[in-house]
Amino acid sequence: MTHRLGDDIDDHCSRCKRTTDHSVVSMLGDEVLKTRCRTCNSEHKYRQNKSRSKEMTAKEAYDKIVASITGSQPEEPAASKRAPSKRRPTS
């Protein structure tokens, strides 16, 4: 797909730490060089929507914000809190 200056494009924002809508602000030929995040207005190189790490889920983001406000550690996933199951040997 060919992009033009000002087009909307999805890209990973390094400030927002997630994929957001961006506007194309710099090109060289048909190649997008820079984009501007439409959420925080920061400009950065076009990353082709690739991030360095896995994006947080909505629950992980919420837990992180709550932990930063209350000063507590975020909760571990529920799967690790389960008690080991006691299985009876089969005869």
Image (tube, rainbow, N blue to C red):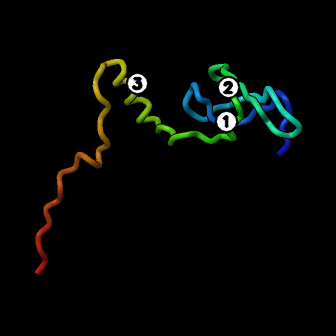
Q: Amino acid at mark 1?
A: Asp
Q: Residue at x 82, y 27 (%)?
A: 6
**Tags 2 and 1 in contact by the CB under 8 Å rule?**
yes
Q: Crowding at label 2, few (<14), some or many (≥20) Cα neighbours within 10 Å?
A: many
Residue 86 percent location from the top left of the image: 13, 62
Residue 90, above or below 6: below
Q: Is residue 82 left or right of residue 41?
A: left
Question: Mark 3 falls on what kind of element?
Answer: helix
Name the residue beneath numbered marker 1.
11
Name the residue beneath numbered marker 2.
37
Query: Which mark is first along the chain, 2 or 3?
Result: 2
Residue 76 percent location from the top left of the image: 30, 39
Question: Mark 1 falls on what kind of element?
Answer: strand
Residue 42, above or below 8: above
Residue 22 percent location from the top left of the image: 71, 29
Q: Is residue 17 left or right of residue 88?
A: right
Q: CA distance from mark 3 to mark 2?
A: 22 Å
Q: CA distance from mark 1 to mark 3?
A: 23 Å
Question: Mark 2 falls on what kind of element?
Answer: strand
Q: CA distance from mark 2 to mark 1?
A: 8 Å
- The residue positioned farthest toward the bottom in the image shown: 91
Q: Quadrant of the C terminus?
A: bottom left
Q: Is residue 2 left or right of residue 86?
A: right
Q: Residue at x 30, y 35 (%)?
A: 75
Q: Residue at x 67, y 19 (%)?
A: 41
Name the residue beneath numbered marker 3.
65
Q: Nearer the viewer, residue 18 or 86?
A: 18
Q: Crowding at label 3, few (<14), some or many (≥20) Cα neighbours within 10 Å?
A: few
